[in-house]
């Protein structure tokens, strides 16, 4: 009786395993069938471009196919995003995109040309970067508390730079203002570079930026970091406290980047791509490259990735509405 039970259990386990193995083999064969296009909806040089090239290189090596990065900047990333929306759902056209296009733009922009849930299949998170609140060293504030006090003592004099209206960094600044009552003014730039230059030059006293952008200037002393907006300190700048440690509760946000495929991509293909992303970003060479840039691999599984998008969308929507922030 025992042997029959064991044989039955083994047969049942095999019956469950074989279809999964077959689906994985079919997905692998489908992905190996033709070249890949990785759409990066922003210009070359930033985290999106870097992560896209890592992904393209890894997929090309894995499947022995050409894999190219197609930089499609314009309309705050919408041009490239809509290109992927229209692509065949076969796993060969992928989108590497920052959080804001998935969690902020749906509330901020009324005539958005895509619907995140209806048009895309989340594949995997790739990486995150700490957001940093930093000031020009001439500013007489060494902590968040001192910055808030200074802004209240001298109203309308402390402004902060961000890479654009409705960016995650802009909203992190607005969240800081809402939580602390700080009298800080937002100045929107077309990208991080111009705003950073004005802060380095002393024209603007403060910036909310992501660590890969600010790290060289923090290391050289041309900027002073007051806090990171994440839930934990960043190992690249371990002496900089979190906002919670600085006494500001209720803010724990970071910049992050993920991979999506067109809606309708077979689940087995999506799952195989998620495994590929984990393998590619887990290599020692890519880990070292990410750390040098102030990025951290963040491999959230497919289902949890979708949940995170929905959660952060719900977090940012009331901030956008209460501050009456509108796309420009």
Image (cartoon, helix red, strand yellow):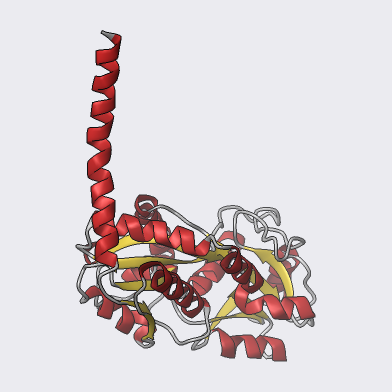
Determine the residue positioned at 77% across, 61% down.
Answer: 239
Task: Find residue 265 and report its horizontal and vertical position in percent.
Answer: 23, 62
Q: Is residue 244 visible?
A: yes
Q: Quadrant of residue 229?
A: bottom right
Determine the residue positioned at 70% across, 53% down.
Answer: 245
User: Residue 286 versus residue 232: which sits nearer the camera?
Assistant: 286
Q: Quadrant of residue 11?
A: top left
Q: Is residue 327 visible?
A: no
Is residue 48 depicted above or below 28 in this figure?
below
Q: Residue furthest top?
A: 1
User: Residue 157 versus residue 36: which sits nearer the camera?
Assistant: 36
**How many marks on residues?**
0
Please state if 42 lies on the left or on the right of 135 as rendered.
Answer: left
Please state, as top left, top right, bottom left or bottom right, where the N terminus lies in the image: top left
Determine the residue positioned at 40% across, 70% down.
Answer: 59
Please state, as top left, top right, bottom left or bottom right, where the C terminus lies in the image: bottom left
Task: Find residue 34 and report its horizontal and vertical position in percent.
Answer: 26, 74
Determine the residue positioned at 35% across, 86% down.
Answer: 75
Task: Find residue 133 and report its horizontal and vertical position in percent.
Answer: 65, 70
User: Residue 10 versus residue 233: which sits nearer the camera?
Assistant: 10
Is residue 121 depicted above or below 97 in this figure?
above
User: Residue 177 versus residue 311: which sits nearer the camera?
Assistant: 311
Please state if 76 lies on the left or on the right of 261 as rendered.
Answer: right
Is residue 105 depicted above or below 69 in this figure?
above
Task: Find residue 19 and report its horizontal and vertical position in percent.
Answer: 22, 43
Please state if 46 lies on the left or on the right of 39 as rendered.
Answer: right
């Amino acid at each position: 009786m025992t042997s029959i039970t064991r044989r039955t259990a083994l047969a049942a386990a095999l019956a469950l395993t074989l279809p999964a193995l077959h689906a994985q083999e079919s997905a692998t064969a489908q992905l190996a069938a033709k070249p890949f296009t990785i759409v990066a909806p922003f210009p070359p040089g930033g985290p999106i471009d870097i992560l896209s090239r890592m992904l393209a290189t890894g997929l090309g090596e894995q499947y022995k196919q050409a894999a190219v990065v197609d930089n499609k900047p314009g309309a705050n990333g919408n041009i490239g995003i809509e290109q992927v929306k229209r692509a065949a759902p076969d796993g060969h056209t992928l989108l590497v995109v920052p959080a804001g296009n998935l969690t902020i733009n749906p509330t901020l922009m009324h005539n958005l040309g895509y619907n995140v849930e209806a048009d895309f299949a989340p594949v995997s998170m790739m990486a995150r970067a700490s957001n940093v609140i930093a000031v020009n060293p001439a500013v007489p504030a060494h902590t968040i508390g001192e910055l808030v006090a200074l802004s209240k003592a001298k109203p309308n004099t402390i402004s902060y730079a961000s890479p654009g209206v409705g960016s995650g960094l802009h909203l992190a600044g607005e969240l800081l203002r809402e939580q602390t009552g700080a009298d800080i003014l937002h100045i929107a730039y077309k990208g991080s570079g111009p705003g950073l230059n004005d802060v380095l030059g002393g024209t603007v006293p403060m910036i909310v930026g992501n660590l890969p952008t600010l790290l060289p200037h923090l290391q050289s002393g041309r900027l002073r970091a007051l806090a990171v907006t994440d839930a934990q300190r960043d190992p690249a700048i371990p002496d900089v406290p979190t906002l919670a440690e600085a006494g500001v509760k209720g803010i724990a946000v970071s910049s992050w980047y993920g991979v999506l495929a067109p809606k309708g991509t077979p689940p087995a293909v999506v799952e195989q791509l998620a495994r590929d992303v984990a393998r590619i970003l887990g290599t020692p060479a890519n880990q070292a490259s990410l750390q040098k840039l102030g990025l951290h691999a963040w491999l959230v599984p497919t289902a949890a990735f979708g949940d995170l998008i929905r959660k952060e969308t719900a977090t940012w929507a009331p901030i956008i509405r209460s501050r009456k922030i509108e796309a420009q």
